[in-house]
Image (tube, rainbow, N blue to C red):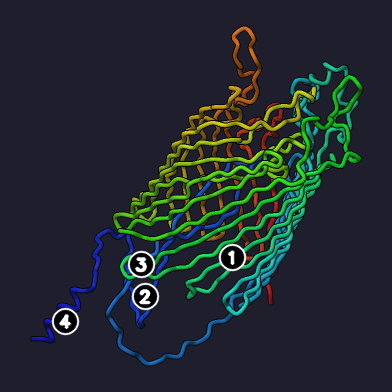
Amino acid sequence: MSFALLLLLSLGSMRLFAQSDSSVYNESVLIHGSFTPVIDRFDKINVAPAITDTSSALDYHFGYQLDPHRLSSIFVPSRFKAVRVVGEPRTRLYHSYLRLGFGNYWSPLFDAYYNSTTSHNLNYGIRLNHRSSWGTIGDEKKPETYYGPNHFSLTDVALFGKYIVNERMQVFTDLAYQNDYNLYYGFNDTTLSHFNYTRGDLKTADYKTAYNHIGWNVGVRNISPTSRFDYDARLFLGDLMGSYGQNEFNMRLDGGVAYRFKLSQMGDLLAALRLSLDGYSQNIDNTLLQPLLHISDTMASWQPDSSYTPHSARLLMGLNPYAEITIGGVRVHAGLRVALDRYGERDVMNTYFFPDVTLSRSFMDDALGITLGAVGNDEAVSWNSIRTINPYIMPCADVQSYRYNNFFGNVRYNFSKKLELNVHASYMLYDNRLSFLPNANYLLNNVFGTKYESGQQLSVGGDFSFVNDEMIALSVGGNYYHHIAVDNDSLPALYLPPFDLHFRADINYNDRLLMHLQLMMVGAMDANFDYDATAAEYVITETTPLRYGLNFEIEYRHNKALSAFLRIDNLLFQRYYYWQNYPSQRALFTIGATYTIPTK
């Protein structure tokens, strides 16, 4: 009798979950030992080749949380005899990847990767990427539509390596070089005729721009899975050299330490501190300055703005203490960001405080997840970051630091293991948001200066996704934005979309045929303004039209080493205007092949 009672009590102490829904997995965990395991549950991400547009692509920001589920059991499995496992042959590994393509508008594509194969402690490699186009825009017989050559070229080379020391610490480094070449092509033949010049009077050297950037990154991080003490540190050195004599050196140092305290009732408490230092030095070599679009004395050439003096040292320092703990099923991340800013004003150190708080909770066996938060930061806007956003920026543009406070909420609901809905909303307060405005010193109206805006933004949006194992993945969603400009000079805010929509479909048929389809739409944006003296207010004079496009890619894998692909950007043949006076190419067709070299 006592044995039966003991057995019933033992069974009652075990938490058993019965699920009638066949779409949800039933899991059993058998554990032997005195330790408490942690099982991190997360969805598999099927990585597929990405499609990019001819000039730019719509950015999407994804985030997910890994919620640990700690399981314990008093069950001890019986011992069994050891069995002999017959060794399987080693899988053939591929340490290199080559992707070659060519498209209309004389557009070559080249990707090459080399990576070391199996090693317990060492990983290293090299990657090389080149993408360019050497076509023209418009019809020469229609001066108002002919913009001439719109050449661009982007080349990246990077060396990287990682080494594990005593299975506790990882040392990593990478060295990267980038060459970025563009033309200030934002003027047509009609514009040139206003100055009694023709396209034949121009050379591409008169309106080209090029940047060379080299960066070195080195760091160390803790990888011990059993240590309660964690740390990481990283140093980055970068140098940007522009064809008009501008030079920008950047040194960035950041790192952090953390310790996990064991609490008897509430689980673990993680206490952490992160520090950062971001410094910039900007200089102009006047001997390398070249006139930009200097056709004759009647046209303006670029000269340094007399009010602009490069800082010998711009500096941002950050301090971020925070703690993480789970209380009553709520995952709490609570911290504070302190920024010491000597970036925008010379010899003036400003101090700013920003929240760093996130609360997340799962319900209904993790089918429903809710996240609320308030985060902010102070970030540098540099010459290097500006040219990656808008390559048609004037040399030595003014730079500021961008500050924001973002209050957000996100709701995730899994209808099943295949269907997921994400809905989000945010309210942001910002200062010195980067925007652009054609600079009046350039008579062709084709060179942009920076415009820094302060205001508020309310956004709501969502994303609905369907995943059928690894064969089909569908995603559809969008965002609506409401902008309120609060600049002291009441200047209109520019390049802010009222909405954006996207649809993406990925199909993988037996790892043999891969297809990708992407549809996007971005609302019209204000691009320029003027002052109406009669109405005593600013009025919008230029607007970029509604932008919509369709991209498609198909790839056939002959075997693990060889495949062929066809990619079509802008399948609807739209003439995009990412920036005022800068139309894009129409459809770009690229055909190519990939090849990997297997190891022995």
Task: Find disc 2 in the rendering and name its residue.
Answer: 36
Q: Residue visible at 78% across and 36% down?
A: 309
Badge 2 amino acid: Thr
Tag 4's secondary structure? helix
Q: Is residue 383 shown left or right of residue 327?
A: right
Q: CA distance from mark 2 to mark 1?
A: 26 Å
Disc 2 or 3, which lies upstream in sequence? 2
Q: CA distance from mark 1 to mark 4?
A: 49 Å
Disc 1 or 4, which lies upstream in sequence? 4
Q: Is residue 388 visible?
A: no
Contact, mark 3 vs mark 1 (Cβ under 8 Å): no
Task: Find disc 3 in the rendering and name its residue.
Answer: 267
Badge 1 amino acid: Asp
Task: Give the percent coordinates (x, y) of residue 530.
Answer: 66, 17
Q: CA distance from mark 4 to mark 2?
A: 23 Å
**Of the numbered discs in the image, which one, if any, rests on residue 95?**
none
Contact, mark 1 vs mark 4 (Cβ under 8 Å): no
Disc 3 or 4, which lies upstream in sequence? 4
Task: Find disc 1 in the rendering and name its residue.
Answer: 232
Disc 2 or 1, which lies upstream in sequence? 2
Vertical relation: 175 (above or below) 184:
below
Pick the front one: 372 or 347? 347
Badge 4 amino acid: Leu
Task: Give the percent coordinates (x, y) of residue 574.
Answer: 63, 31
Task: Find disc 4 in the rendering and name its residue.
Answer: 7
Q: Is residue 377 shown left or right of residue 313?
A: left
